[in-house]
Image (cartoon, rainbow, N blue to C red):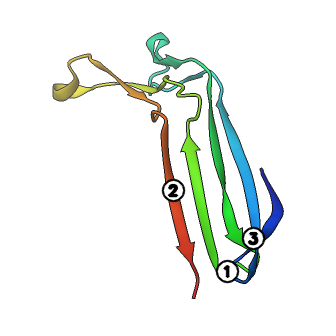
Amino acid sequence: MQYSHSVGHAFRSSVDGYVGGSYNYNTRMNTSANNSSYGWVQAYGTLNLNFGFRDHSGRWDFQGFINNATDERRISQLSQGGGMSGNGAWYAYVTQPRSFGFIARANY
């Protein structure tokens, strides 16, 4: 979802400011191939935000973003190693930690 509104003029063009975000919810699920009771991952959600300014005609855009804004640290997948490499071990994959950055775009 994104909200945009005109905020004035710069560089001889109209400028729009915008804010937006998305929320991704993952339900409780079993991620093991054999439906093991050890393969259950609890439900979790992640919030991503973005904000910025852009030329109304689309010539330039300056955006900031924050992924996983609440810094939700959860296991996203569990899998059991097999054969010679696994020896019965379980492997866990975790969610991406909070990250942020900026993006500058120009169309010419």
Q: Could you tell me the amino acid type at mark 3?
A: Val
Q: Residue furthest right?
A: 5
The quarter in which the C terminus is drawn is bottom right
Place residue 60 in its image quadrant.
bottom right
Q: Which mark is residue 11?
A: 1
Q: Quadrant of residue 30?
A: top right
Mark 1 vs mark 3: in front: 1
**Nearest to N terminus: mark 3 or mark 2:** 3
Residue located beneath label 2 in the image = 102
Mark 3 secondary-structure assignment:
strand
Classed neighbour count for the residue bearing mark 3: other residues with Cα under 10 Å, few (<14), some (14–19), many (≥20)? many
Could you tell me how far apart the alpha carbons at marks 3 and 2 are, in whole angstroms? 18 Å
Residue depicted at 72% across the width and 84% down the height: 12
> Tag on residue 15?
3
Question: Which dot, 2 or 1, sits closer to the camera?
Answer: 1
Which residue is rendered at x = 52% and y = 62% of the image?
Answer: 103
Front residue of 26/89: it is 26
The residue shown at (62%, 21%) is: 43
What crowding class fits label 2: few (fewer than 14 Cα within 10 Å), some (14-19), or many (20 or more)?
few
Q: Quadrant of residue 26?
A: top right
**Residue 98 to residue 28: above or below:** below
